[in-house]
Image (tube, rainbow, N blue to C red):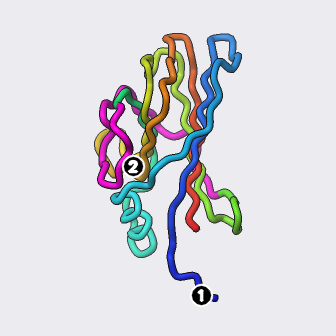
Amino acid sequence: MIKDGIIALGDLEIVLCDAQGRVKEHRLEKNLVVNVGLAFIAQRMASTPTVMSHMAVGTGGTAAAAANTVLGTEVARVALTSASNTTTTVTNDSMQYVATFPAGTATAALTEAAILNAASAGTMLSRTVFAVVNKGASDAMTITWTIKVA
């Protein structure tokens, strides 16, 4: 059997900790790889667009859509802590991106997140909208985002 189609699927894990490092909230979410993100994946096969390097969070509530290129209301953007190939089903079929939003950064009732390839503007790979995560001023939040190409 010939497998003809390729899809990109994403999951993210959000862990919110208080100032003492105790987990206040832990959640798993799905995401949407947007149109410009799919184009980015295809371009990486033959050219070298700038790699994904940042994660952003915001307070927008509009549902994720394939045509998205920015968050609804971006609150903060940080450089990725790590980006590495991982194995979900087939060796190296996934990329895992990790970012930490430290105390004092992204203090808000957060409802959306994205992976991008620049400190400002840039190309969005994926976006998700989720139920409110209330990040206080002394809280730290780590998001681990896995994109699988299948």
Q: Which mark lies nearer to you, 1 or 2? A: 1
Give the main secondary structure, helix, strand or loop, of the magenta stretch: loop
| Quadrant into which the C terminus falls | bottom right
As drawn, 117 above or below 22:
below
Instruction: Identify the residue at image location x=61%, y=59%.
Output: 94
Mark 2 sits on what residue? 117
Instruction: Identify the residue at image location x=44%, y=45%.
Output: 115
Which quadrant would residue 38 be assigned to in this image? bottom left
Percent of width and height locating residue 85? 63, 58
Mark 1 sits on what residue? 2
Mark 1 vs 2: CB contact within 8 A:
no
Report the magenta residues as a range.
Answer: 61-85
Foreground of the two, 140 or 130:
130
As drawn, 25 above or below 19:
below
Instruction: Identify the residue at image location x=38%, y=29%.
Output: 58
Is 86 on the left or on the right of 73, as rendered? right
* Amino acid type at mark 1: Ile
Q: Is residue 63 magenta?
A: yes
| Quadrant into which the N terminus falls | bottom right
